[in-house]
Amino acid sequence: MERTIEIKRDLREERRQAAEAFRQSMALKKTYVVRLLSSPGAGKTTLLQKTAAHLGREYRVGILVGDVETERDAQRLAPFAPSHQITTGGACHLELPLIERALPKLGAEPFDFLFVEDIGNLICPASHDLGEHVRVVLLSATEGDDKPGKYPKAFRSSNVVVITKTDLLPYVPFSVENAIQDALAIQPQLKFFNVCALNDEGIAAWCASLVAARHELLAKSPSP
Ligand SMILES: Nc1nc2c(ncn2[C@@H]2O[C@H](COP(=O)(O)OP(=O)(O)OP(=O)(O)O)[C@@H](O)[C@H]2O)c(=O)[nH]1
Ligand SMILES: [Mg+2]
């Protein structure tokens, strides 16, 4: 027998409110939440290694990292900052309840910076708000400069683009200018950074922008 069940809850609105509440609660703890998304292998974990090493001299850094399987990324990050792996067992993106459950496992709260590396995927993660203060999409030189237009939601919903693996630019047909124009056509507010995590080029400027953005957030947030 067929039955119709009427659901009188607006689940989207509930999720939106939960993400907003998380964002505010982290701001009250003076924690700036930075979320990275990209296609698989664009360099998220490598960038986080360098970022944690750089910021870790002065700031408390925690990292949550999502993958479908394995603890490999958390193991790579552990020498640089408290890190915890969230394995989804198949799901293609992280969701806020996973972040909330994993956060206490980092131990040393409160952090000045909490980094969240989402599953390598330019599609699904873009549809989920994890309560981050800034969403950063990575685009590596080997992926092609046409990707913003092909995966618009990831770029439209982000605040910052980091172009990675710039050491490979002489060897691949990738125009930074074309990539920037393609992304700006989708989201004119985007900010851009070029980095090579292998030789640290651009890492200091990228980290300085995070420090400045955190100060801006703290200046706007009420004291607890
Ligand atoms: N040439 C070059 N290679 C890089 C750079 N950054 C990262 N890589 C390499 O790119 C590969 C993937 O880097 P990861 O940091 O694991 O990428 P990821 O985005 O975290 O990958 P997933 O978590 O699997 O999505 C590794 O072999 C890195 O050493 C870079 O700046 N230049
Ligand atoms: Mg990774």
Image: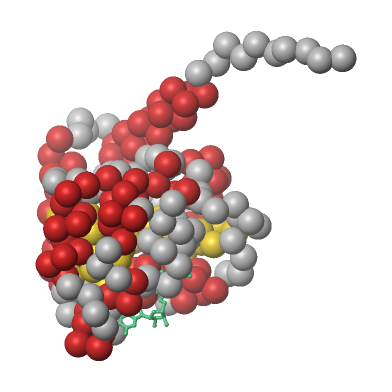
**Residue 86 picture quarter:** bottom right
Task: Report x, y in % for residue 118.
Answer: 44, 56
Looking at the image, is 169 positioned above or below residue 94?
Answer: below
Task: Report x, y in % for residue 220.
Answer: 15, 35
**Residue 196 picture quarter:** bottom left
Judge left or right: residue 107 versus residue 160: right
The residue closer to the viewer here, 61 or 108, is 61
Ligand 1, seen in the image, is in the quarter at bottom left
Looking at the image, is 20 positioned above or below residue 83?
Answer: above
Q: Which residue is most to the right?
A: 1
Tally of numbered discs: 0
Judge left or right: residue 75 versus residue 56: right
Classify the position of the C terminus by image quarter: top left
Looking at the image, is 6 positioned above or below residue 201?
Answer: above
Taking the spot 20% from the left edge, 46% from the top edge, the residue there is: 187
**Is residue 167 among the parts visible in the rendering?**
no
Taking the spot 17% from the left edge, 73% from the top edge, the residue there is: 175
